[in-house]
Amino acid sequence: MNSPFFWCIFALFAIAAMGAPVALSMIVSSIIYLLLKGQDIGLAAEQMLQGLYDSFLLLAIPLFITAANIMNAGTISERLLQFCLALVGRFRGGLGHVNVVANMIFAGMSGSAVADAVGLGKIIIEMMRKDNRYSAGYAAAITAAASTIGPIIPPSIPMVMYALISDTSIGYLFLGGFIPGIMMGISLMMLNARQARIENVPLEEPVPRKELPKLTLRAFPALMMPVILLFGIYGGAVTPTEAAAIAALYALMVATFLYRAIDLKTLYGVFLESGRATASVGLVIGAALIFNYIVAAENIPAKVSVLMQGLNVSPLTFLLAVNALFLVLGCLLDATTIILVIIPLFIPTCRALGIDMVHFGVTAVVNCMIGLITPPYGVLLFVINAITGISLKTIINSIWPYIGVLVVALLIMLLVPDTVLFLPKMFGYVPGGK
């Protein structure tokens, strides 16, 4: 490692350790690298602008963010919860099952774990804690864990980012996330059933079956969003970016004209919050583009690839080792940083070993989502703490079983590639590391 790159890495971790945002740390450390190399520091701005403005795919991110915020501002979340309560609320641990199923449905609309946690979390946690039926830790932990399904079942903002850095088909990535997302949901529901028996959670008052058609009709427009979105993409009518625009427009039409839940003042707040979130994500992506330019200039991915091939590891051993690394990094770094900065280092090795890029991408995103609930940095733990007031200590003490079952689900995905590739292959995908 030469001196400029060493000081670049040192500056990155030193600035981040002082509490600065990761995006700022990457930009400043990149500028230090360019100065030490005697290059024009304007390259930093050039790489950022070219990367952001040349990628049509990135337009999907602000559109999915806007769609999620519109749904959170309207009554869509409440209608979905009432529908799920009628479906699975009658079983032991019913509200925990409602929590998971609602997140699985909401996942087909938002593409963001944080959006799922904010949109559904506060409502469902209040329902669970009413009359002390569920402990605070139980309610918070299952809500945080269920929110991780959001970016796995399509659409998915993290998968859009992975498609950007790996040149992989976003459509096949979306398809690859269906079965893993359902696996994660089933795993959490099985654990919830066990926890409910251990804690002797009381049964909920069952919703009369005769009310199910009425509740389904109330939720039907919301339930149609993922159907319209996915049939549009896989029917070849629209690109994923165009589908994101349709999702945002559909959410606006439903919330404004059908549910009459959004007025001009609320809509202004939605657009303002969406703009802030987009700017935050865009800054991280732009910073990562600069940093990735430096990594490419130093030929780091090729050196990593040569090193790994020199170790003569099998594709499965490589996958397991890299995912173990991602799990550790997920305790310390946010998912966006791992996807945009760390994962590109291993993509050349994946291709050299013949590892399928859709399989690798989906499992890597699942891994990053587990990181969102892993102490000490798990972002979703802080989100749940902020919206409910439940202490971090309480949430962390209860989250470990949920992390455990999600890791087991991830291991199955790694060992059985068809859990990811079955649906893409049905739609014409030919696996092969491309």
Image: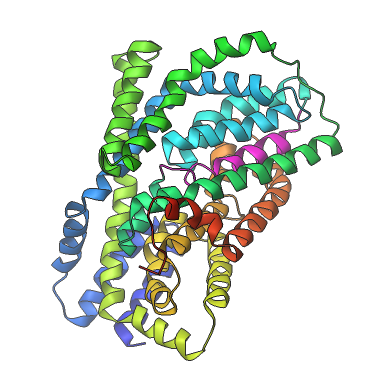
Q: Is residue 250 above or below residue 193?
A: above
Colour mapping used in the image: rainbow
Q: Is residue 269 visible?
A: no
In what quadrant of the picture does the C terminus appear?
bottom left
Q: Is residue 149 above or below residue 321?
A: above
Can you give x and y, in whole percent of width and height, for residue 112 in the image?
44, 41
Q: How many dots with numbers?
A: 0
Q: Position of residue 116 (x, y in %)?
A: 50, 35
Residue at (36% x, 18% y) in the render: 254
Q: Is residue 349 above or below residue 99?
A: below
| Foreground residue among 268 and 167 | 167
The answer, for residue 181, to whether it is visible in the render is yes
**Looking at the rendering, which quadrant does residue 132 occupy?**
top right
Instruction: Determine the image quadrant of residue 206.
Output: top right
Tell whether 113 sits left or right of 207. left
Residue placed most toward the observer, 271 or 301? 301
- At 21% across and 82% down in the image, what residue appears? 37
Residue 364 is left or right of residue 195, and the answer is left
Give the quadrant of the N terminus. Answer: bottom left
Read off the magenta span.
134-155
Residue 129 screen position, x and y as percent: 71, 26
In this view, which residue lies farthest toward the bottom?
Answer: 310
Residue 27 counted in the magenta span: no
Residue drawn at x 73%, y 50% as measured from the top left? 401
For the point 60% across and 55% down, which residue is it? 376
